[in-house]
Protein backbone atom coordinates (compact mmCIF):
# COMPACT_ATOMS: atom_id res chain seq x y z
CA UNK A 1 0.00 0.00 0.00
CA UNK A 2 1.34 3.43 -0.92
CA UNK A 3 1.28 6.66 1.01
CA UNK A 4 -1.93 8.57 1.65
CA UNK A 5 -2.07 11.37 -0.91
CA UNK A 6 -3.40 14.71 0.28
CA UNK A 7 -4.42 16.45 -2.91
CA UNK A 8 -5.32 19.98 -1.84
CA UNK A 9 -4.84 22.71 0.71
CA UNK A 10 -8.52 22.38 1.65
CA UNK A 11 -8.05 18.69 2.36
CA UNK A 12 -4.99 19.50 4.50
CA UNK A 13 -6.93 22.09 6.50
CA UNK A 14 -9.58 19.47 7.24
CA UNK A 15 -6.96 17.14 8.69
CA UNK A 16 -5.53 19.49 11.34
CA UNK A 17 -5.79 17.82 14.72
CA UNK A 18 -6.15 14.32 13.26
CA UNK A 19 -3.86 11.34 12.89
CA UNK A 20 -3.40 11.26 9.13
CA UNK A 21 -1.36 8.15 8.33
CA UNK A 22 1.17 5.60 9.47
CA UNK A 23 4.17 4.24 7.63
CA UNK A 24 3.68 0.53 8.10
CA UNK A 25 6.37 -1.57 9.71
CA UNK A 26 10.10 -1.42 8.97
CA UNK A 27 12.70 -3.75 10.50
CA UNK A 28 15.58 -1.89 12.13
CA UNK A 29 18.48 -4.32 11.78
CA UNK A 30 21.84 -4.57 13.52
CA UNK A 31 23.41 -3.92 10.13
CA UNK A 32 21.60 -0.57 9.89
CA UNK A 33 22.81 0.29 13.40
CA UNK A 34 26.41 -0.62 12.47
CA UNK A 35 26.26 1.50 9.29
CA UNK A 36 24.85 4.46 11.24
CA UNK A 37 27.60 4.10 13.86
CA UNK A 38 30.22 4.08 11.10
CA UNK A 39 28.76 7.16 9.41
CA UNK A 40 28.35 9.20 12.61
CA UNK A 41 31.46 7.88 14.39
CA UNK A 42 29.25 6.99 17.37
CA UNK A 43 30.48 3.53 18.37
CA UNK A 44 29.07 3.37 21.89
CA UNK A 45 28.98 -0.29 22.94
CA UNK A 46 25.21 -0.36 23.63
CA UNK A 47 24.76 0.06 19.87
CA UNK A 48 27.57 -1.95 18.29
CA UNK A 49 28.88 -4.59 20.70
CA UNK A 50 26.34 -7.40 20.47
CA UNK A 51 27.98 -9.70 23.04
CA UNK A 52 28.67 -7.04 25.65
CA UNK A 53 25.17 -5.59 25.23
CA UNK A 54 23.64 -9.01 25.67
CA UNK A 55 25.60 -9.49 28.93
CA UNK A 56 25.78 -5.98 30.43
CA UNK A 57 23.04 -3.80 28.97
CA UNK A 58 19.74 -3.39 30.80
CA UNK A 59 18.11 -3.81 27.36
CA UNK A 60 19.36 -7.39 26.86
CA UNK A 61 21.00 -6.56 23.54
CA UNK A 62 21.99 -3.72 21.28
CA UNK A 63 19.69 -0.79 20.68
CA UNK A 64 19.46 1.73 17.85
CA UNK A 65 20.86 5.20 18.27
CA UNK A 66 18.09 7.68 19.01
CA UNK A 67 19.39 9.80 16.14
CA UNK A 68 19.12 6.80 13.80
CA UNK A 69 15.45 6.51 14.66
CA UNK A 70 15.06 10.26 14.14
CA UNK A 71 16.89 10.13 10.80
CA UNK A 72 14.43 7.52 9.55
CA UNK A 73 11.49 9.94 9.93
CA UNK A 74 11.83 11.20 6.36
CA UNK A 75 11.78 7.68 4.96
CA UNK A 76 8.88 6.63 7.18
CA UNK A 77 6.95 9.78 6.24
CA UNK A 78 7.44 9.06 2.53
CA UNK A 79 5.79 5.68 3.10
CA UNK A 80 2.91 7.26 5.03
CA UNK A 81 1.81 10.51 3.43
CA UNK A 82 2.37 12.61 0.31
CA UNK A 83 1.37 16.26 0.15
CA UNK A 84 0.45 16.96 -3.46
CA UNK A 85 -0.36 20.29 -5.03
CA UNK A 86 1.32 23.10 -6.89
CA UNK A 87 4.47 23.04 -4.77
CA UNK A 88 7.93 23.21 -6.31
CA UNK A 89 9.56 21.61 -3.28
CA UNK A 90 9.25 20.62 0.32
CA UNK A 91 11.95 21.09 2.93
CA UNK A 92 12.65 19.86 6.41
CA UNK A 93 12.50 23.13 8.35
CA UNK A 94 13.41 21.61 11.72
CA UNK A 95 12.10 20.19 14.94
CA UNK A 96 10.42 21.97 17.83
CA UNK A 97 10.69 19.11 20.25
CA UNK A 98 12.21 15.61 20.23
CA UNK A 99 12.18 12.94 22.93
CA UNK A 100 13.31 9.31 22.99
CA UNK A 101 11.06 7.72 25.67
CA UNK A 102 11.95 4.08 24.95
CA UNK A 103 14.73 2.09 23.25
CA UNK A 104 14.56 0.43 19.84
CA UNK A 105 16.11 -3.04 20.18
CA UNK A 106 18.09 -4.26 17.17
CA UNK A 107 15.94 -6.45 14.96
CA UNK A 108 12.65 -4.90 16.07
CA UNK A 109 10.07 -3.45 13.75
CA UNK A 110 9.18 0.24 13.90
CA UNK A 111 6.49 2.41 12.35
CA UNK A 112 5.76 6.12 12.43
CA UNK A 113 2.35 7.68 13.00
CA UNK A 114 1.72 11.22 11.82
CA UNK A 115 -0.81 13.64 13.28
CA UNK A 116 -1.18 17.04 11.60
CA UNK A 117 -0.77 19.47 14.48
CA UNK A 118 -1.00 22.73 12.53
CA UNK A 119 -1.01 24.34 9.11
CA UNK A 120 0.15 27.90 8.54
CA UNK A 121 -0.05 29.70 5.24
CA UNK A 122 3.11 31.61 4.30
CA UNK A 123 3.56 34.15 1.49
CA UNK A 124 5.59 31.59 -0.47
CA UNK A 125 3.78 28.38 0.55
CA UNK A 126 2.70 26.56 3.69
CA UNK A 127 4.21 25.31 6.91
CA UNK A 128 3.01 22.07 8.49
CA UNK A 129 3.82 20.83 11.96
CA UNK A 130 3.50 17.07 12.28
CA UNK A 131 3.31 15.30 15.60
CA UNK A 132 5.33 12.19 14.81
CA UNK A 133 5.49 9.10 17.01
CA UNK A 134 7.68 6.09 16.25
CA UNK A 135 6.40 2.86 17.75
CA UNK A 136 8.27 -0.38 18.34
CA UNK A 137 6.05 -3.35 17.60
CA UNK A 138 4.76 -4.77 20.88
CA UNK A 139 6.16 -1.96 23.07
CA UNK A 140 4.09 -0.04 25.60
CA UNK A 141 5.28 3.45 24.67
CA UNK A 142 6.79 5.09 21.59
CA UNK A 143 10.53 5.18 21.04
CA UNK A 144 10.41 8.69 19.60
CA UNK A 145 8.00 11.60 19.77
CA UNK A 146 8.66 14.80 17.86
CA UNK A 147 7.14 17.99 16.56
CA UNK A 148 8.44 18.11 13.01
CA UNK A 149 8.24 21.29 10.94
CA UNK A 150 8.01 21.00 7.15
CA UNK A 151 7.62 23.74 4.58
CA UNK A 152 6.24 23.45 1.07
CA UNK A 153 7.12 26.22 -1.37
CA UNK A 154 5.23 27.28 -4.51
Image: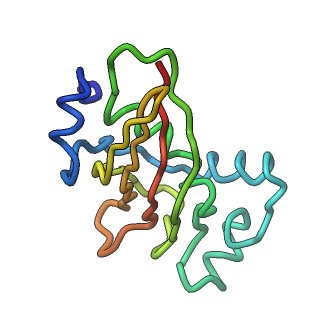
**Residue displayed at 24% across by 35% down:** 12
**Residue displayed at 57% across by 43% down:** 93
Q: In terms of depth relative to the viewer, which is nearer, 44 or 142? A: 142
Please state if 118 lies on the left or on the right of 12 as rendered: right
**Residue displayed at 84% across by 55% down:** 41
| Residue 127 picture location, percent across and down | 43, 40
Q: In terms of depth relative to the viewer, which is nearer, 118 or 140? A: 118
Which quarter of the rendered picture does the N terminus lie within? top left
| Residue 69 picture location, percent across and down | 54, 55
State which quadrant residue 67 falls in.
bottom right
Q: Is residue 84 above or below residue 69?
A: above
Please state if 111 lies on the left or on the right of 15 as rendered: right
Q: Is residue 80 above or below residue 51?
A: above
Pick out the residue farthest to the right. Answer: 41
**Residue displayed at 18% across by 51% down:** 18
State which quadrant residue 48 falls in.
bottom right
Q: Is residue 89 above or below residue 102?
A: above
Q: Is residue 19 above or below residue 60?
A: above
Amino acid sequence: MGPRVIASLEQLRGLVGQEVADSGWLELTQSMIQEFAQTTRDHQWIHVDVERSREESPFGGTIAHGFLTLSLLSHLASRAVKVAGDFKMGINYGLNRVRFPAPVPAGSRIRARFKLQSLEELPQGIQLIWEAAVDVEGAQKPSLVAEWVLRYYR
